[in-house]
Image: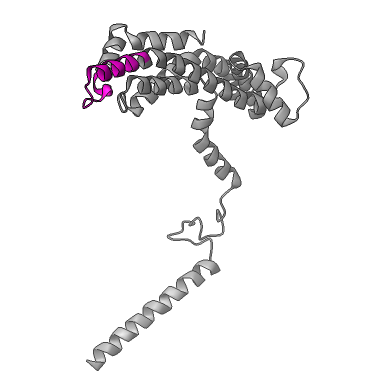
Amino acid sequence: MKQKRLQQRVKLGAIGIAGMAIPRVLCAAPQAGVNGLAIPGLTGSGSSIPVDIIVLLTLLTLLPAILLAMTPFVRLLVVFHFLRQALGTQSTPTNQTLIGLALFLTYFIMQPLGMEVYRTAIVPLESHQISATEAIGRGSEPLRHFMLRYTRQKDLSLFVELAKEPRPRRPDDLSMRVVIPAYVLSELKAGFQIGTILFFPFLVIDLVVASVTTSVGMMQLPPVVISTPLKILLFVMVDGWNLVVGSLMKSFY
């Protein structure tokens, strides 16, 4: 028994010595690596992550939110949310369905603008005719014109004042720092206005059903149980989705 314990201690001591020797060997010969290959992070080369990669990964994470804020996606999604609340269907259509529909409608609206950006900025950049900075400047111009077309002057004045920038002679002189938040505010206001208008017909149905059930004395039956099928039936009979989507799309043309 004592011999077995002594052998186990000798083995553990050998493993510990080997474990302590490995980092020293790697530090003494950083270029050796394993089987002649350099190990990033352990060897001398590639031990630090470039700052450019961190910035690029951060931008890739935020890019979807930035692009969606600069497109009609905000207005479309707000209107669809109000419509679902007005119908009284809390989870139908699902969030994934509404987001997918809003994304495809956004692509339909922005596709001509994307082609223009590709033609004026990306094609010259790929052919090495302009630099990346010039490509960003050229690509932002069509997007600036699009956002200014649907941005209220009141919102632009607010952010010009907050940014403490000189009053521009023309809208094209405004920086994207001012145009983007002003555009988002304008789109939110437009979405809430359209959603409020959509609410009124369904609100009338709710009021009528509630007054009828109260006058008849049907206190045990919630008015929502009767008004929800009536609202859905009315919406289907007038082809509501076609009217709503058609009106939204025409508001951008």
* Camera-nearest residue between 87 and 187: 87
In which image quadrant can residue 214 be found? top left
Horizontally, is 38 left or right of 142 in the view? left
Q: Looking at the picture, how far across and down is residue 115, in whole percent?
A: 52, 15
Q: Main secondary structure of the magenta part?
A: helix
Q: Which residues are magenta?
A: 204-226
Identify the residue at horizontal 31%, vertical 11% (top origin): 235
In which image quadrant can residue 247 be found? top left
Identify the residue at horizontal 23%, vertical 25% (top origin): 219
Identify the residue at horizontal 29%, vertical 86% (top origin): 7
Q: Is residue 211 magenta?
A: yes
Q: Is residue 175 visible?
A: no
Horizontally, is 145 left or right of 225 in the view? right
From what the image shows, is residue 194 above or below residue 1?
above
Q: Looking at the picture, how far across and down is residue 113, in whole percent?
A: 54, 15
Q: Looking at the picture, how far across and down is residue 38, in whole percent?
A: 49, 56
Horizontally, is 119 left or right of 79 in the view? right
Total marks in image: 0
Identify the residue at horizontal 63%, vertical 29% (top origin): 132
From what the image shows, is residue 168 above or below residue 17?
above
Q: Is residue 221 magenta?
A: yes
* Camera-nearest residue between 209 and 197: 209
